[in-house]
Image: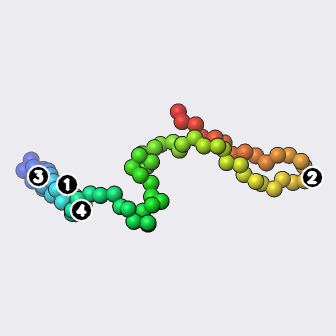
Amino acid sequence: MLKVLKILVTAHALVGGAAMLSACGQKGPLFLPTTPESAGRATLPETLKVWPAKTAPATTTVPSDPTTNTPAPTPPQLTPP
């Protein structure tokens, strides 16, 4: 029983090592794209931000009922912990 377990662990380690070494197959130097299609993409620091930058709150225009004369509800604001 111990021999079968050792074979399975060794096989998994070899397969995992081969997968790690093969990586994604990207060849050549890494570079930042400068094509027009890549102009609107997020940069790495922008993708790592957990909370969006604080900007002026967006105002929503919801048509109110003229008979009740109550203001439209405002969406809740997100604040970082």
On the image, the x and y values in percent for residue 11 come to 12, 56
**Secondary element at image label 4:** loop
Q: Earlier in the sequence, mark 1 or mark 2?
A: 1
Other-residue count near label 2 (Cα within 10 Å), few / some / many at <14 / 14–19 / ≥20: few
Compare marks 2 and 4 and give the one earlier in the sequence. 4
Please name the residue that numbered disc 2 is placed on: 67
Q: How many angstroms separate mark 1 from mark 2 (CA)?
A: 67 Å
Residue for badge 4: 26
- Specify few, some or many for label 1: CA neighbours under 10 Å numbering under 14, 14-19, or 20 or more: few
Q: Under tag 3, what secondary structure?
A: helix
Label 4: how many Cα within 10 Å (few below 14, some 14–19, many 20+):
few
C-alpha separation, residue under disc 3 versus residue under disc 1 = 15 Å
Q: Earlier in the sequence, mark 3 or mark 2?
A: 3
Q: Which residue is mark 1?
A: 20
In the figure, 47 relative to 54: above or below? below
Which residue is at 39% across, 49% downward?
Answer: 44
